[in-house]
Amino acid sequence: MSHDPIHAEQRRRLLQSTLAAMTLATTGRIAWAQSQVETLKIFTGFPPGGTSDTLCRRVAERMPSTGYARAAVVENRTGAGGQIAVQATRTAPADGSTLLQTPMSMLGIYPHIYRKLPYDPIADLSPVSLGCTFDFGLAVGPMVPASVRTVSEFLAWCRQNPAQANFGSPAAGSMPHFIGALLGHASGVPLNHVAFRGTQPAILDMIGGQIAAVSGPIGEFTQHVAAGKCRLLGASGDKRSPFAPNTPTFVEQGFKDMSFSEWFGFFVPAKTPNDVIARLNTALRSALAAPETVNGLATMGLEARSSSPAELAALLKADTERWGPLVKTIGFTAD
């Protein structure tokens, strides 16, 4: 039996390349396993049950299946209108194990209203991805007569009942706070603002008859509206919200400059390496695109959306610039 030296050499090379490929695959898997985060902490500045918390929990559920982290936990770092969570992120390890989810307000509006913030939105954080977008609504509870069906009627009622002319929002200096203030400003009706730690506590006071109205994300009201406990008078989007199609926008009701939407975004501590941010962005895009996430967010009136880090940075810049003049109009400072 003759041995073909050419075939033997080919077999030897094939065996070598197969072994090399297997070794590479194994080391690749080891490197991937080593680069995988043990536990990803997702910080939100708002309490359980609200829109911010819902987004965090939906994403946390999906993160292990993306391969980025073995486990993901949500930490509700509430207080100071969402600032505590931002501060906690700023000082967290920049190794991809801590992720902040925050509304735009804390980063784009707060610099205009606080003389001294305990963080710099640009220098202390790196953008990773957009999380979702949503509109706001103005709702009234049992303190306001059932005959009041529009924003103008509510403002007219406030003018006649100055002692009860108040509205709650999730935080002082947040977009919902300013929407209420701008409505009052546009109509010349002084509205007293009451700040809460999140929208749900504000809504509970409203449906309990302690305050007249609440300005907050539309999705926070839908279950209470469905139960007949409050009425949605207006919505802040440039078109009607798919989550409240029967509620006319503020613009439709004659408040021509009152078109506002907000976003929740994901950020990491500033010195997080670019390759880690890229991996986290890929994982977040996958988590946000999952049908369970999309449908789960829709129940809260949130539209799941992702972006590149650069797109999120550009969005934050545009919103920061838009809100400077608006804050001056309202004349609000938090200090």
Image (cartoon, rainbow, N blue to C red):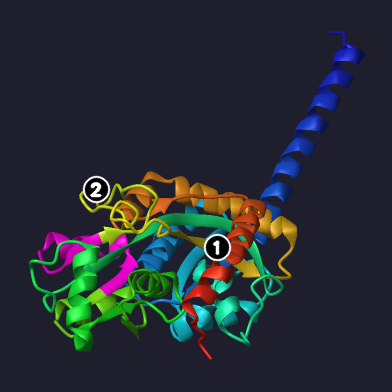
Q: Is residue 84 left or right of residue 215?
A: right
Residue 245, numbered circle? 2
Is residue 36 visible in the rendered image? The answer is no
Q: Which mark is residue 266?
A: 1
| In the image, residue 231 lies in the stretch drawn in magenta | yes
Q: Residue furthest top?
A: 1
Mark pair 1, 2: CA separation: 29 Å
Task: Give the class, few, some or many, for how many residues have Cα within 10 Å of label 2's Cα (few <14, many ≥20).
Answer: few
Label 1, secondary structure: give it: strand
From the top left corner, tell me how far across and down residue 300 is, in percent: 30, 59
Of marks 1 and 2, which one's residue comes earlier in the chain? 2
**Residue furthest front in the image:** 188
Judge whether residue 216 is colored magenta.
yes
Which amino acid type corresponds to the residue marked 2 in the rendered image? Pro
**Left or right: 45 as drawn, with respect to 37:** left
Say if 30 sits above or below 87 in the image.
above
Q: Which residue sits at x=72%, y=39%?
A: 22
334 is higher (above) or lower (below) than 285: below
Q: Is residue 321 left or right of residue 260?
A: right
Residue extent of the magenta highlight: 214-233
